Image (spheres, rainbow, N blue to C red):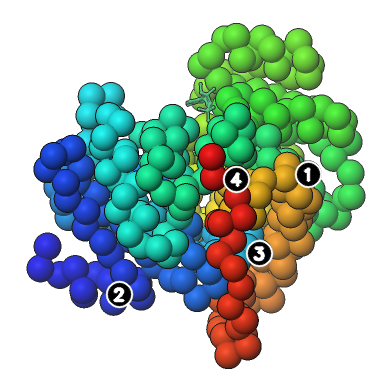
Amino acid sequence: MSDVFQSMNKKSHEQVVFCNDPDTGLKSIIAIHDTTIGPALGGCRMLPYATEEEALRDVLRLSRGMSYKAALAGLNLGGGKSIIIGDAKKDKSELLFRSFGRFIEGLGGRYITAEDVGTSVRDMEWVRMETQYVTGISRALGGSGDPSPVTAYGVFVGMQAAVKHQLGKESMSGLKVSVQGIGHVGYHLCKYLHENGAKIFVSDMDDSALKEANKEFGATVVGLDEVYGLDVDIYAPCALGATVNDDTLEQLKCSIIAGAANNQLEKESIHGEKVKAKGILYAPDYAINSGGLINVANEIEGYNRERAFRQTDGVYDTLLRIFKVSDEENIPTHIAGNRVAEKRMEDLVKLKNHYLPRKNAMSKRDNN
Ligand code: NAD
């Protein structure tokens, strides 16, 4: 752990907080990457990291990604993330999460947490007992609830942008789309696609999800591996990461990749280039799936579902801007996405001197 400052300097992290509470078993790291645009928002992962170095690496990498995601989503938020070292199946307790909440409270709003891999809405409700700086809690407690419908909507409008750019079409009617993973997001995505006249192909290992998609949306069921080689216009990964790799790229016949899954490119630098070389338009995952983040961010100002959907409409223009930069600079779209995000962050720095303090937004929320 001797290189913490060096690691922070590499990607310009502002603050890393190590939280240790032997009484509750809490071992956590909170990383705040950048708060230029606003407080750092990002979920809390609970994983049994093999080493503390691995945990630190993960939280630094993820928190930086959140700065870019928030900037691209047009939110006035910075990037942060936290991890709790532990086994989500065995080590959870009310005290653990309340202790974590107290550390967050101590940061006075510089970091706002939410659920992520290994944590749940219920865990966040324990965190909420100790701090107001938490989002993604249940609708019953005044939160935003399940973000998936908003995420799916963002993926759908992002797809429309990709179709316009790549195929010169305004309509999804008659287009063939394969959706991999009919879970929370995939299901709602199929609904939008069906309503807009697309022909849908679905794959999942969950038979009941496939049956439902077939019955409700007339979707054609295909095998788990068959999904890559289909003759479709759009491949929508909505299950796992790393599905765009050497093996699948040989099979893909689509002209667009646009889906909800995180980290779709197995190795960004290699597979981003390969996708481009193949003439496939890739909608960068962190831009197209930002509806989920927009949804939880909305909770900060007092949740309004309609506003969350309307803000998510912005995914369309953001993607068109990314595709334009990609064309103009002849760079893969995931790099173009970074450029667009960096430009917004740089631009907003100029506002710094004109910033007018306002009441803490979090205090507006019903805090019962
Ligand atoms: P989910 O767990 O509800 O659904 C995933 C589905 O994929 C499940 O039905 C599962 O059976 C299926 N699946 C797993 N492996 C598969 C495989 N090899 N082939 C086909 N299907 C497979 O998850 P979700 O909430 O719908 O999220 C989907 C993806 O989008 C995840 O990668 C998630 O990280 C990402 N994402 C989700 C949100 C959100 O709001 N839920 C926001 C941003 C990103």
Mark 2 / mark 4, whichever is N-terminal: 2
Instruction: Report whether 110 appears left or right of 249.
Output: left
Q: Residue at x 31, y 69 (%)?
A: 15
Q: CA distance from mark 1 to mark 2?
A: 39 Å
Which residue bears the numbered disc 1? 306
Q: Provide residue 266's location: percent of width, then percent of height.
A: 42, 47
Q: Residue at x 30, y 46 (%)?
A: 100
Q: CA distance from mark 1 to mark 4?
A: 19 Å
Q: Label 4 is placed on what type of residue?
A: Asp
Q: Label 2 is placed on what type of residue?
A: Lys
* Residue 82 in view here: yes
Mark 2 / mark 3, whichever is N-terminal: 2
Q: Which mark is residue 10?
A: 2
Secondary structure type for disc 1: helix
Mark 4 / mark 3, whichever is N-terminal: 3
Image quadrant containing the C terminus: top right
Q: Provide residue 132's location: percent of width, then percent of height.
A: 47, 50
